[in-house]
Image (tube, rainbow, N blue to C red):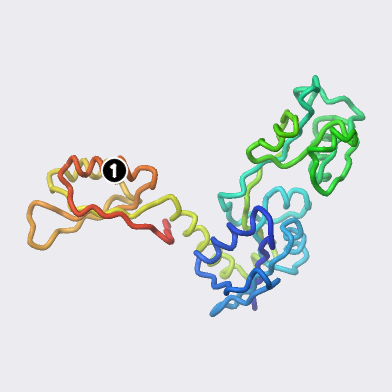
Amino acid sequence: MTLKIGVPNKGRLNERTVDLLRKAGLDLGEDIGRKLYVQIRNQDIEVMFVRANDIPGFIDRGAIDMGITGLDMMAESGCQLHNALNMQFGYCHLAVAVPMESQVRDVKDIPDGSRIATSFPRCTEEYFKSIGKDVEILYISGAAEIMPYLGVSDYIVDLVSTGSTLKMNRLVEIGTILESQAAVLVSERAMKEHAREIEEVTSALSSVISAEGRKYIMADVPKECLPKVREIMPGIGGPTVLQLAGSDDYVAVHAVVEQDRIYSIITDLKRMGAKGILTMPIERLVER
């Protein structure tokens, strides 16, 4: 039975999602910008390109088996889905914001009857009910930041990543409703019907994510320096140490290291007298 995967067709999550799927080994072809669905070559998998906020509902109704979208989208949909994998991108949070000139600096001080503009009415309503506030929720499809200026609302609830858009529109964040990032979402039904296929896809994606920010480093190191090398190059389960043919004084050491430590590691290796130092990118890393 074909596994159907929903992917955002545009917006902040699309490009990164497509990149990770390709790196994971799913051949999407060359014309995905013009196609709404593609059959993965050599795999019984179909990828559907749909709106990010539609993906949770499509999974819940069984139209697709799994999908990649923001956790904020799942929360707003109200669908009870399983988070199979946090994708470690698309970080943002749903925040309450007020005009800079407002005296309100805490959500508990928002007066009852206040008008809140948002494109996340479900999450907003549930949040304000949970803190005992009786507010009016005004649904808008976008550009919430301008609503207080237009007099449409008193305050807003919107997604925030860096906060620069709020500042440009003279708004101040005063509370967080939820944290979000891109995630692989699946239904209980799909988990039963496609358990093996879902595990294979999530494992492949996870291996790509694990490999990012890592480098493979190799060096010929004096034998007497091995204890120090193990400290600076611990690797995953320890560095790989190989005897060099024709040399009794040096050994070859291989390890996976964090990319941001490459400079200091190479510097330390050179001080030890290491030679033949080589670093290589890693496409996928299966840690367990």
Tell how many labels: 1
Check the image and report above or below for 175 versus 222.
above
Q: Residues within 10 Å of mark 1 (few under 14, many from 20)?
A: some
The residue located at (52%, 61%) in the rendering is: 205
Nearer-the-camera pick, 110 or 147: 147
Image location (x, y in percent) of residue 236: 35, 51
Nearer-the-camera pick, 174 or 150: 150
Of the 4 image quadrants, the one containing the C terminus is bottom left
Mark 1 secondary-structure assignment: helix
The residue located at (58%, 50%) in the rendering is: 89
The residue located at (82%, 45%) in the rendering is: 122
Image location (x, y in percent) of residue 250: 12, 52
Nearer-the-camera pick, 262 or 125: 262
Instruction: Name the amino acid type tagged 1.
Output: Ile
The residue located at (76%, 64%) in the rendering is: 58
Q: Name the outermost residue toward the top.
A: 103
Of the 4 image quadrants, the one containing the N terminus is bottom right
Image location (x, y in percent) of residue 131: 80, 30
The residue at which mark 1 appears reads as 265
Image location (x, y in percent) of residue 86: 58, 52
